[in-house]
Image (cartoon, rainbow, N blue to C red):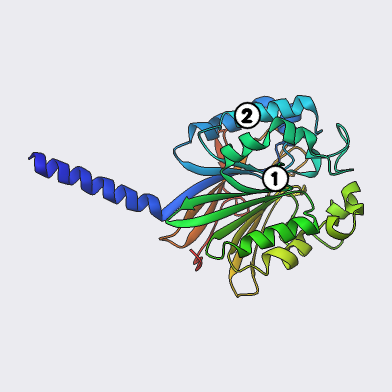
Amino acid sequence: MKVFSCFLILTIIIQFSCKAQDAFEFVVLPDTQTYVEEFPEVYMKQMEWVCSQNNRFSFVLHVGDITQNNSVEEWHIAKKGFSLLDGKIPYCLALGNHDMGSGAGKFADTRNTSLANTFFPINEYVANSKTIATFPKNSIDNSCAEYHLIDEKWLVFSLEFGPRNKTIQWANALIKKHPNHKIIINTHAYLYNDSSLHDGDDWYLPQKYGVGAATGDDAVNDGGQLWEKLIKTNKNILMVFSGHILGSGVGKLVSKNDYGTEVFQMLANYQKNVKGVEKGDSGYLRIIKVDKKEKTISVKTYSPWLDTYKTEPEHEFVFNNVKTL
């Protein structure tokens, strides 16, 4: 009987391990700027819930605009929330236009990210995100984290608002050194709410902010340029996540890169002034599940504050037949 029991337990463990290797989940936090500014209780509820799911999620991405006014007070709140995840769930931060500037409320007039780097010191950030490289060195402005999931290696790049030419060069060089890794790009401004790339005559382009005046290696890039210079030319980039855009606040796009491989690109933003977010306190976030066995990437939208899901097609959907998984 003891032998049978041990065999049964071993079988369950093996089956569970195999199942665990088939899929993983992670969280994408859309712009929290107005939560941190006006509804800190909603933001903290988000972070408390994510923390409570530490055995479920492999990592957390923030698409940027962590704060609204890039102020000391708001960064204190932002740090308090992410501190709950320290040592429990790795997290990667993309800095948005509201997370940089010469002073509080100066949205990306300059590429000054001193407060973000003060509240998230580089050594702590590297440890809490599993980062293997940053750009510029000793800053969190751009980072690359590595994870081992579903028996494969993944790189997650978190790129600044309006990634500069030299930032794209850094990312390209790092990707070339990891040709067998699967890659996720996390950045603030990339996709528009009509499910097209953020470029042309679209609102809120990086070029329209103060940082957009730079030239040469410091010149900024919008979504269309980022696709051409980075995403389209690398065969192992699988997903792209972004925020920034209002209106419906959502969009999705599947495009083939230069190698004929599909890239799954998503916009999510549920802050104040987004359509359907009446008071700006909805607290919705995205839950992404990557299933290697089923060859799917599924997306759900959930609010820990309201304890409810958005189930409309633009908020809950599945990408099927993902051949690169």
Residue placed at 28% from the left, 51% from the top?
Answer: 15
Residue placed at 10% from the left, 43% from the top?
Answer: 3
Q: Looking at the picture, tell me which residue is in the foreground, 59 or 141.
A: 141
The label shown at residue 17 is none
- Characterize the local packing of mark 1: few (<14), some (14-19) or many (20 or more) Cα atoms within 10 angstroms: many
Residue 140 vertical position relative to residue 239 in the rendered view, above or below: above
Residue 204 vertical position relative to residue 5 in the rendered view, above or below: below
Query: Residue 202, can we see it?
Result: no
Q: In this view, does 193 lie to the left or right of 215?
A: left
Which image quarter: residue 261?
Answer: bottom right
**Circles 1 and 2: CB atoms closer than 8 Å:** no
Q: Circle 2 sits on which residue?
A: 81
Q: Residue flagged by tag 1: what amino acid is it?
A: Ala
Which image quarter: residue 60?
Answer: top right
Q: Circle 1 sits on which residue?
A: 94
Q: Is residue 125 left or right of residue 320?
A: right
Q: Residue furthest front?
A: 137
Under circle 1, the secondary element is: loop
Residue 117 vertical position relative to residue 228 in the rendered view, above or below: above
Disc tally is: 2
Q: Residue flagged by tag 2: what amino acid is it?
A: Gly
Sequence-first disc among 1 and 2: 2
Q: Where is residue 56 in the image (x, y as percent from the top left)?
A: 45, 41
Q: Looking at the picture, tell me which residue is in the foreground, 6 or 193.
A: 6
Q: In this view, does 32 lie to the left or right of 180?
A: right
Looking at the rendering, in which quadrant would you find the N terminus?
top left
Residue placed at 92% from the left, 53% from the top?
Answer: 213
- Characterize the local packing of mark 2: few (<14), some (14-19) or many (20 or more) Cα atoms within 10 angstroms: many
| Label 1 – label 2 distance at C-alpha | 16 Å
Q: Position of residue 83 (x, y in %)?
A: 60, 29
Q: Looking at the picture, tell me which residue is in the foreground, 201 or 21.
A: 21
Under circle 2, the secondary element is: helix
